[in-house]
Amino acid sequence: MFSTRNCSRREFLVERLDLSADIQSSRIGRFILDALLAAGGHPWTVIRVERRKAYMESLENASVRHDIRDFPRFSSEEIAASAKLE
């Protein structure tokens, strides 16, 4: 099971970079996030196309409203879904 307690702050910091830069940096931000998760024993995570809007909303809540609760929840769901793909 994925622990949001251990990764949520790191994820927030990496994804904060994701929002504030261009497309290429966005890809680098996602790669860094996945590398951190993989280093913790979690699967590489795929943000499903149909969940992209929820992903962007969770990042916006964290960045604009300083409310990071949605992002770890969203990440946990996507990590669980990615684990099922393996």
Image (cartoon, grey):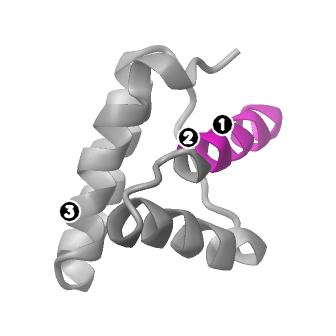
Residue 53 in the figure: left or right of residue 40: right
Cα distance in 3D space between marks 2 and 3: 16 Å
Could you tell me the amino acid type at mark 3? Leu
At numbered mark 1, what does the secondary structure look like: helix, strand or loop? helix
Residue 47 drawn above or below residue 73 = below
**Is 75 a magenta residue?**
yes
Question: Residue farthest to the bottom?
Answer: 22
Q: Position of residue 54 (x, y in %)?
A: 67, 70
What span is in magenta?
A: 72-86
Q: Residue at x 32, y 30 (%)?
A: 36
At numbered mark 2, what does the secondary structure look like: helix, strand or loop? helix
Q: Which residue is mark 1?
A: 76
Q: Position of residue 63 (x, y in %)?
A: 34, 66
Label pair 2/1, CB-CB below 8 angstroms: yes
Residue 30 in the figure: left or right of residue 69: left
Q: Which residue is mark 2?
A: 72
